[in-house]
Image (cartoon, rainbow, N blue to C red):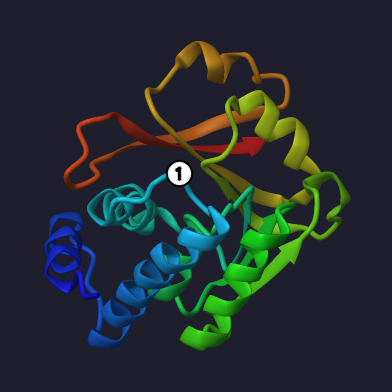
Amino acid sequence: MDWSNELEQGLCKLAVEATDHQKKQLNDLLVNLLKWNKSYNLTAITDPSQALTLHLLDSLAVFPYIKQPRIIDVGTGAGFPGLPLAIMLPEVSFSLLDSNSKKIRFIRQIIHQLDLDNVEAIHSRVEQHKFQYDGVISRAFASLEDMINLTQHLLSPSGVWLAMKGVYSKEEVLSISDKAIETSCYKLEVPNLSAERCLIELVSC
């Protein structure tokens, strides 16, 4: 199937410029996600339009704020936000980490199928992975405290956390003030989504 028109509209609203090749890669990612999901239950989202909005466009809403050369997506699930960002940022190295083996198998298949040479899939618990990165991004953690506590060993001395969240909570940010400092908070506008989204950027104290 082809959702190129809906994808094109979404990218336009996000002001994300993509080549025809990148658009095809994003469309193929969505097609394969929905195909694999029928057998492997990769995501609870089965409606194509919702998957486009909640996976592809939600991931790409943070595109303007990715400045680090080496990033790890922790708790990536079926590869979000890592895979869409890797497609759009071929000069950035992405490591996609998850403890779910079937989701990592899907990511590895996508890496091969889309010929993504800037992505690696890591099957591991976050506590067991020991490399350091310029950026740690995730939309999987329920709280900033959990994200900071579980991933601080992955962050290089000059690195940043990029936490994709819903409604911004100053209290939540203050709760981790002994370990991390907020440097920026960006309000995200996801096309066709009325729910609030934000990206919180933090550095280690």
- 50 or 85, which is in the foreground? 50
On the image, the x and y values in percent for residue 109 come to 58, 78
Q: Quadrant of residue 24?
A: bottom left
Q: Quadrant of residue 63?
A: bottom left
Q: Amino acid at mark 1?
A: Ala
On the image, the x and y values in percent for residue 173 come to 55, 20
Left or right: 56 with respect to 90? left
Mark 1 neighbour class, 10 Å CA radius: few under 14, some 14 to 19, many 20 or more: few
Outermost residue, top side: 171
Image quarter where the C terminus lies is top right
On the image, the x and y values in percent for residue 144 come to 60, 27
Image quarter where the N terminus lies is bottom left
Q: Is residue 169 above or below residue 84?
A: above
User: How many numbered marks appear?
Assistant: 1
Which residue does the image show at 53% across and 53% down from the upper left? 41
Q: Can see residue 149? A: yes
Q: Can see residue 118? A: no
Residue that label 1 marks: 44
- 40 or 15, which is in the foreground? 40
Left or right: 203 with respect to 113? right
Which residue does the image show at 50% across and 86% down from the upper left? 113
Q: Quadrant of residue 69?
A: bottom right
On the image, the x and y values in percent for residue 146 come to 69, 28
Q: Is residue 28 above or below residue 199?
A: below
Which residue does the image show at 23% across and 86% down from the upper left? 20
Left or right: 42 with respect to 149? left
Which residue does the image show at 13% across and 55% down from the upper left? 13
- 38 or 47, which is in the foreground? 38
- 37 or 143, which is in the foreground? 37
